[in-house]
Image: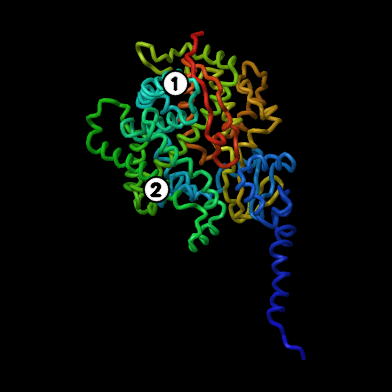
Amino acid sequence: MLPLNIPVIVAGALVPLAFYKFVISPAFLSPLAKVPSAHWSAPFSPLWILWIRYRRRENRELHAAHLRLGPVIRLGPNEISVNDLTGLRIVYGGGFEKGDWYSIFDNYGVPCMFSSWHSRPHSARKRMMSNVYSKSMLHASPVLARQAEIILYDRLLPFLASSTFVESGIDIHETWNATAMDFITAYQFGLKNGSNFLRDVDNRQHWLHLYYIRKTYPYFTQELPRLTRFLKFFGIHLVPLWVDRANRELEAWTKDRCDATVEYLKTSAADEKDIANEPVVMKALLSGMEKEGTIKGDDSVLTNTLLKYPELSISSEMIDQLAAGHETSAITLTYLSWELSRDASLQDALRAELHALSLSPSESTRSLPNSKDLDALPILHAVVMETLRLHAAIPGGQPRMTPYPSCTLGSYSIPGGVRVGAQAHSVHRNPNIYPDPDKFDYTRWMDDQNGYSAEQKKERDRWFWAFSSGGRMCIGSNFAMHEIKLVIAAVYTNFRTYVVDDEGIEQTDGYTCGPRSNRLILKIERAITP
């Protein structure tokens, strides 16, 4: 009788079992097997989509796959992508929670509103601050108006006026980063405790350097968290240690402002004579936290996070808002400046429209335009909307997890626990809604010129997804729109711009993606009054 070779027997049993589990089941028996695959390997392995993301080609590759295969496609063994209105409503309308992909947006070791996995704690946080970001509040706010007046007239316009002597041009992306940071931090902390990056060149460049050198490394902790932690245990750092140091410095910078604002509110706010120093967002958050603790106490869904670690939670919320608030607006302003600078006739038409607002720094009485008058300018609104469509500041995937036990997307039954997402890059390039979708055509949004029917207008607006949708859409969308319109109105009333170097403006792929090298050089000239 031949002796038993146990290892051979075990291997012989495990090989077919593994083949069944990793090949047969995902490819033919899984509920996802019916979903068209963006790549032949998608049913068996996530390596294709991981490689695509690592190379920062996700948006273009997924868009091409959707054009070939339809509105629902499979990206990996447990991941799909959607690209139609029905899918957007189902996934982002409620019931699909976030997952650990968003933990990278925790700060100081605690979550913020954006990184909260579940809808209930997100809603509780949102209620504390949503009012100060509402359109009606922003347009009626004397505090924001005063802050905007100072930032535009005392900082931005003088800086651009001095730049007219710079023959080689200026880095406009850095300028818009500084402008957007000054706007959002003033609204958060008050003008005196916010940034002054338009004037403080050294601090601005140091801060932006710290912020942008980290940008490629979240890939590892978001897409490969287990591997990243495993290798780190053995001293192998996929995310370099200097990234952690940069994060800590940025966190310390923000916490200093939070602490200074709290101290200001306790000691000198009552005697303040300039309303520009009112910290609107911080006041709302502090008031909301006090109300939540008083009314709900230990029954609050925020008991173990925001109420347990109030100082760190405040700082986490503030750094998330200032990061998102400055980066996305700066990206949009950069692409908008690029499109205007390539079209002199469009600049002239916009300037003629803006002239009635009297946004000149030489006016004896400095004042901002009425918000309704600003919103009523058709060319200004159209160029902003078309920039957001074609160059969405967050064009990449915004993943959610399918609910248990299952859901239906398109004609497919999808089990719970599957990663699913959509991307604005593809949503905004539906040729049936936006003809010639890769062309910058601001007349799409000018209803007195484009000849759109009522139904075409509705469809155009339904497919606009620059700020996401549903209960977790961008809380700062109204702030961003108002800020961008104010900045463009002030600048292009008084100056003309020309492209000197746009080597870095090509859009790349990723979750957030600005100009490829964050570089666009514009020549600034004084405008001729129309």
Q: Is residue 438 left or right of residue 382?
A: right
Q: Amino acid at mark 1?
A: Ser
Helix, strand or loop status at disc 1: helix
Residue at mark 2? 248
Q: Who is closer to the viewer here, 193 or 373? A: 193
How many badges with numbers are in the image? 2
Q: Dividing the picture into quarters, in which one does residue 279 lie?
A: top left
Q: Who is closer to the viewer here, 299 or 18? A: 18
Quarter the N terminus occupies: bottom right
Q: Which mark is drawn over residue 494?
A: none
Q: Is residue 468 visible?
A: no
For mark 2, does the 10 Å Cα neighbourhood hold few (<14), some (14 to 19), or many (20 or more) residues? some
For mark 1, does the 10 Å Cα neighbourhood hold few (<14), some (14 to 19), or many (20 or more) residues? some
Residue at mark 1? 163
Q: Residue furthest right?
A: 1
Q: Amino acid at mark 2?
A: Arg
Q: Is residue 241 left or right of residue 387?
A: left
The disc, 1 or 2, on the residue closer to the chain's N-terminal end is 1
Q: Residue furthest front?
A: 168
Q: Is residue 419 above or below residue 423?
A: below
Q: Who is closer to the viewer here, 148 or 341? A: 341
Residue at screen point 60% across, 30% down:
389
Q: Mark 1 against mark 2, which lies toward the viewer?
A: 1
Q: Residue furthest top?
A: 530
Q: Dividing the picture into quarters, in which one does residue 142 lie?
A: top left
Helix, strand or loop status at disc 2: helix
Q: Is residue 412 visible?
A: yes
Q: Who is closer to the viewer here, 236 or 90? A: 236
